[in-house]
Amino acid sequence: MTTLGFNAPLYILPFDHRGSFQTKMFGWSGAISPNQTAEIAAIKQVIYDGFKAAVDAGVSRGKAGILVDEQFGAAILRHAAEHAYTTACPAEKSGQEEFDFEYGEDFAKHIESLHPTFCKVLVRYNPEGDRTLNRRQAARLKTLSQYLHSDGRSRFMFELLVPPEKAHLDQVKGDKKAYDSELRPRLMVETILELQDAEVEPDVWKIEGLDSKEDCEKVVAAARRGGRDNVGCIILGRGENDQKVRDWLTTAAKVSGFIGFAVGRTSFWEPLVDLRTKRITRDAAVAEIARRYQEFVDIFENARGKIRAA
């Protein structure tokens, strides 16, 4: 793959969560049995059915996509590929503070076996944090980036989380919302530039929500610097409440270079909890996930449409 970037509309329903499903959804710790694995896979099928229902109801197939893991979602990934849906699959170990490959040196074999549209990584990286840690992560990510852009058939999706250092929290007196609005945007831009200089080249940056249009523009400028004109950005939901996700989508949609979103838990968590506690039926859970996903698509497209009209 020689052309860097992906600049088409992209509305991802992500449900590649692994550790949080085991511990928070099911209350399991440690290694799980084949039966437990099948139970998580079955609940993820509910999300996938919601996604398909939304496409059947009018969400553009060409813009829609799923992000699901191999451990619990291999069958879903294969079905989605057979039916020409956009797919993404994570390469990272779940729930780790430091990025490393889920399947170690065999990462390429696993990517090729499923051939997702995107290979996704989730990385926690603060440019003002542990330099040795950052260098280790950047080296692994460079290996993946070079593989995907030379021998791989999947594009590179990078989910960037910038956790605060103690000094940052001290600066905002422990107020994490203040950190998000006052410090995180600058640190995100610095991280993008630092990783690019380390030869880490995502096609799509998956970005924590930003409160201002100006901060969104700065992130796009960083992602597209130096001739990376087709690199896209998408906003992630981070499990925030419905109103906060709406605000983030509306803000990002106003900025050229933000091509869509990846909103997972806000779309599916509550319906799945209600299903597991038998407050609603499986069909009702599927319908509610479809409705929420469709609504987020509509919010993004309506906000983008207003900008184009103006």
Image: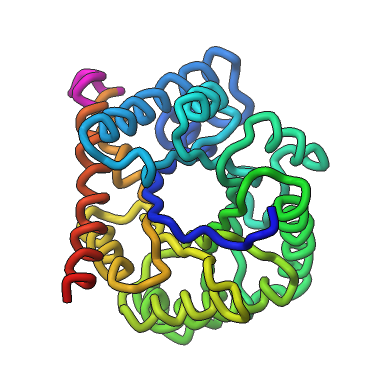
Across and down, in percent, residue 135 comes to 77, 69
Q: Residue at x 46, y 86 (%)?
A: 171
Q: How many marks?
A: 0
Q: Residue at x 22, y 37 (%)?
A: 58
* 183 part of magenta stretch: no
Q: Residue at x 40, y 32 (%)?
A: 25
Near-viewer residue (52 or 166)? 52
Across and down, in percent, residue 195 comes to 67, 71
Q: Which residues are magenta?
A: 276-285
Across and down, in percent, residue 266 comes to 30, 47
Q: Residue at x 59, y 15 (%)?
A: 34
Which residue appears farthest toward the top when viewing the image?
Answer: 35
Which residue appears farthest toward the bottom when viewing the image?
Answer: 171
Across and down, in percent, residue 124 comes to 59, 62
Residue 304, above or below 90: below
Colour logic: rainbow
Q: Is residue 237 left or right of residue 134?
A: left
Q: Is residue 143 left or right of residue 55?
A: right
